Image (spheres, rainbow, N blue to C red):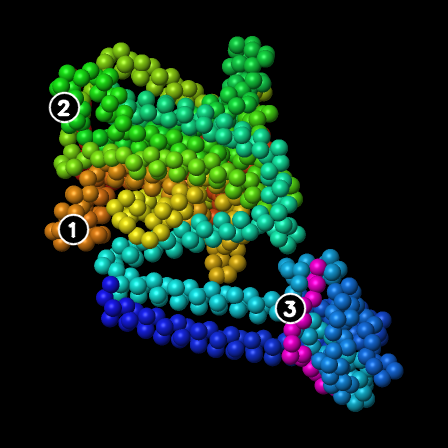
């Protein structure tokens, strides 16, 4: 490091910080003086409105809060040459009077009141606002609040005699709130200036440094900060630090729920990964003919609300299901519990594995496979020793993503869990059904992070120990078909069975849009379609915000993947963990934590479109990041190094080399973000507003009110919109054919 530049950096940073501190103190001094002068005038004017009859003083004193929010007034009558509290006393003000009533400051203030002077005490005092009457104590959010105390004399009609004095307690929360906000801006400005100065003066690659700083700021504000708020709540009880919530979380009830979540997550992730790999292998690595159709149909479960498939399952296979009860006359069959829930989650989530593994299989250069076959290895030997190991990063990533998604899901367990207890549902019920216990929900959500982070670290450690590079230059344009006719037949049968089952579930949804009341009255009707008109604003808002979020999440995830895989910088693992964390958190907690974090200065985002888009991007960023990291693990860094040697900067390399080579992962990230944004419900239900409503919230509302016909109509409309935009996205994004390959039969 250049010593001269470092000295210049330190001097510039110190000058800016000194100026920042001077501006902060000047603004604080001016604001404090203004507030104190304003309060002084307000209390003086208030006391001038004292009624003539002392019997009306109690009502009059209670009106002081309308003048200065949170203030409290006590009347002290002048008797026998001293002031005695007579009206407005309570436990809190009595405790203050007993503590300080005989102090020199109070005696001097009362003496000045006798001589008709309005006095503000120099020192601040703490008052137990939780000891006030319930309707008054709710004004101030904290138990012990610092107050400024004013003594204002009540002057007799003769104009020269004090009948008494009013002691007015004005909380300093307004000044403290402004102080906190101004301090945040001052510290933020100092940190931003020092970080930018460091990137410009002390790093060899300022562009990369700015990219890292930008990503770090994003995850700190929109991931770490809400999580810290949730963590703080989990250790609070009635406004005070307490371990009671965590003791409750370690009780047998929630340990059983955690075990249920783990069983469900492992079963769902394993089944989804197996099915996703089989379909992806059939589509990407065999001479199967209907690849485009199967790819579209296989992704359908992610283009509908997560609870829609559960409703279809219940209607078809539930206690009064159309197939089990009415057609097959099965009286003892039950879809509820671990088995049925695993089936629904597997159908809902295997597209995650399919999309992830497809991108990896498409990237594999078949040169090594061809060499193996040329050396007389069988197809099975080649697949087992070459293809499967090279696809391992994608398989592990797919398993982990499905596992975390399963743990975080609450909508499907809410409908199908039966006697099975899972932690996500317990957290949701605590937050929504037990007096809004946000701390309890936060605590259970942090318990869910433990298995997720464990799986994440194991997967990262295993991948880091091996090399999976196959793209070292221009990739091969042909692939060897490693399957025999019998194997292709088996894969095709499994694929068609899964796709057929999916279509059956969605046909149930479509059919429900044209019947009066599914399960009771199957009469054909078009009256349900009025829901489209009633929900038109919600449809427009959902589509617009999803279209904004999709490219944003896609670009951010690819940039982050490139930085994590290709660059070394301080805090890289911390950044990666933070970016992966949102996928492990139940959506309910994400929504609530965003409300807590962004419903106060300095970021007042609740009720705006911005917080919805941010939620979309942050929640789905891990999928794009995993896809990008997996794809980059297969690309030799020497390609990018050659471009750097020829004078290309980091943005140029990213735009012209990295992004085209990871195009399948980029398109998958955008597509997945769009469909997940369109179908989000758990977090979005807390973030919508009258102006920015969401279609899935409408669908959920209709479902909860057993208006399945209207819910089916909106589900159908949502599916049509997503399929249309998804197809348009594939057409508009230019395909450079860099990873397009043909299948060579051997």
Residue 124 is inside the magenta segment: yes
Q: Nearer the viewer, mark 2 or mark 3?
A: 2
Quadrant including the N terminus = bottom left
Q: Which residue is mark 2?
A: 371
Q: Which residue is mark 3?
A: 146
- Mark 2 or mark 3, which has the lower sequence index? 3
Q: Residue at x 26, y 38 (%)?
A: 633
Instruction: Answer above or below: position of 170 versus 527.
Output: below
- Front position in the image: 187 or 721: 187
Which residue is situated farthest in the right direction here?
A: 80
Could you say where residue 33 lies in the image, as x and y percent from the top left? 56, 79
Instruction: Answer above or below: position of 88 versus 454.
Output: below
Say left or right for 488 vs 233: left
Could you say where residue 407 lies in the image, as x and y percent from the top left? 48, 34
Q: Which residue is mark 1?
A: 644
Q: Which range is magenta? A: 116-130
- Mark 2 or mark 1, which has the lower sequence index? 2
Could you say where residue 542 lies in the image, as x and y percent from the top left? 43, 43
């Amino acid at each position: 490091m250049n010593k001269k530049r470092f000295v210049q950096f330190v001097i510039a940073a110190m000058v800016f910080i000194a100026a920042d501190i001077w501006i902060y103190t000047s603004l604080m001094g001016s604001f404090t003086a203004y507030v104190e002068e304003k309060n002084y005038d307000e209390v003086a004017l208030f006391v001038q409105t004292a009624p003539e009859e002392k019997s009306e003083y109690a009502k009059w004193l209670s009106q002081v809060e309308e003048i200065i929010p949170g203030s409290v007034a006590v009347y002290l009558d002048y008797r026998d040459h001293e002031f005695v509290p007579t009206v407005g006393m309570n436990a809190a003000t009595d405790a203050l009077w007993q503590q300080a009533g005989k102090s020199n400051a109070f005696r001097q203030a009362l003496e000045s009141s006798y001589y008709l002077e309005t006095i503000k005490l120099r020192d601040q005092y703490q008052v137990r606002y939780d000891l006030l009457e319930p309707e008054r104590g709710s004004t101030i959010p904290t138990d012990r609040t610092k107050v400024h105390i004013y003594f204002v004399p009540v002057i007799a009609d003769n104009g020269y005699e004090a009948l008494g004095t009013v002691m007015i307690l004005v909380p300093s929360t307004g000044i403290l709130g402004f102080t906190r906000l101004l301090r945040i801006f001052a510290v933020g400005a100092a940190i931003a200036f020092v970080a930018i100065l460091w990137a410009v003066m002390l790093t060899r690659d300022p562009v990369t440094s700015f990219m890292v700083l930008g990503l770090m700021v994003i995850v700190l504000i929109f991931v770490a900060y809400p999580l810290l708020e949730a963590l703080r709540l989990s250790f609070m009880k009635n406004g005070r630090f307490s371990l009671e919530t965590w003791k409750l979380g370690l009780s047998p009830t929630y340990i059983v729920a955690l075990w249920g979540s783990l069983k469900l997550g492992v079963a769902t992730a394993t089944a989804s990964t197996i099915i996703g790999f089989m379909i992806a292998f059939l589509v990407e690595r065999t001479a199967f003919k209907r690849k485009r159709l199967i790819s579209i149909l296989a992704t359908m479960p992610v283009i509908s609300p997560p609870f829609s498939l559960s409703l279809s399952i219940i209607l078809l296979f539930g206690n009064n299901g159309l197939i089990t009860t009415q057609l097959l006359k099965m009286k003892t069959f039950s879809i509820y519990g671990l088995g049925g829930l695993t089936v629904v989650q597997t159908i809902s989530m295997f597209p995650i594995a399919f999309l992830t593994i497809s991108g990896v299989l498409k990237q594999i250069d078949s040169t090594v496979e061809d060499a193996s076959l040329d050396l007389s290895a069988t197809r099975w030997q080649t697949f087992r020793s070459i293809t499967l190991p090279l696809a391992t990063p994608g398989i592990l990533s797919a398993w982990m993503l499905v596992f975390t998604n399963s743990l975080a899901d609450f909508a499907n367990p809410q409908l199908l869990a039966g006697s099975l207890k899972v932690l996500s549902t317990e957290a949701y019920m605590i937050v929504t059904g037990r007096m809004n216990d946000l701390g309890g929900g936060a605590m259970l959500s942090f318990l869910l992070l433990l298995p997720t982070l464990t799986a994440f670290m194991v997967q990262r450690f295993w991948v880091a120990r091996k090399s999976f590079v196959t793209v070292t230059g221009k990739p091969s344009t042909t692939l060897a078909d490693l399957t025999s006719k019998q194997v292709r037949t088996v894969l095709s049968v499994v694929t068609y069975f899964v796709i057929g089952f999916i279509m059956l579930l969605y046909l149930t949804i479509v059919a429900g849009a044209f019947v009066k009341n599914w399960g009771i009255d199957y009469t054909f009707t078009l009256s349900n379609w009025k829901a489209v008109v009633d929900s038109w604003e919600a449809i427009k808002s959902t589509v617009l915000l999803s279209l904004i979020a999709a490219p944003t999440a896609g670009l951010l995830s690819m940039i982050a993947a490139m930085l994590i895989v290709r660059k070394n910088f301080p805090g890289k693992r911390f950044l990666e963990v933070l970016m992966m964390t949102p996928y492990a958190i139940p959506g309910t907690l994400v929504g609530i934590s965003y409300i807590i974090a962004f419903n106060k200065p300095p970021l007042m985002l609740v009720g705006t479109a911005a917080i919805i888009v941010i939620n979309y991007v942050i929640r789905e960023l891990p999928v794009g990041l995993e896809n990008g990291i997996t794809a980059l693990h297969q690309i030799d860094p020497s390609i990018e190094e050659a471009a750097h040697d020829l004078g290309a900067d980091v943005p140029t390399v990213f735009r012209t080399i990295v992004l085209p080579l990871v195009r399948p992962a980029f398109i998958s990230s955008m597509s997945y973000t769009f469909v997940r944004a369109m179908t989000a419900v758990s977090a979005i239900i807390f973030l919508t507003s009258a102006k920015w409503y969401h279609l899935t919230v409408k669908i959920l509302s209709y479902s909860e009110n057993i208006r399945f016909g209207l819910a089916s109509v909106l589900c159908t409309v949502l599916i049509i919109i997503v399929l249309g935009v998804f197809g348009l996205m594939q057409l508009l994004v230019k395909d450079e054919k860099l990873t397009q390959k043909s299948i060579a039969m051997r």
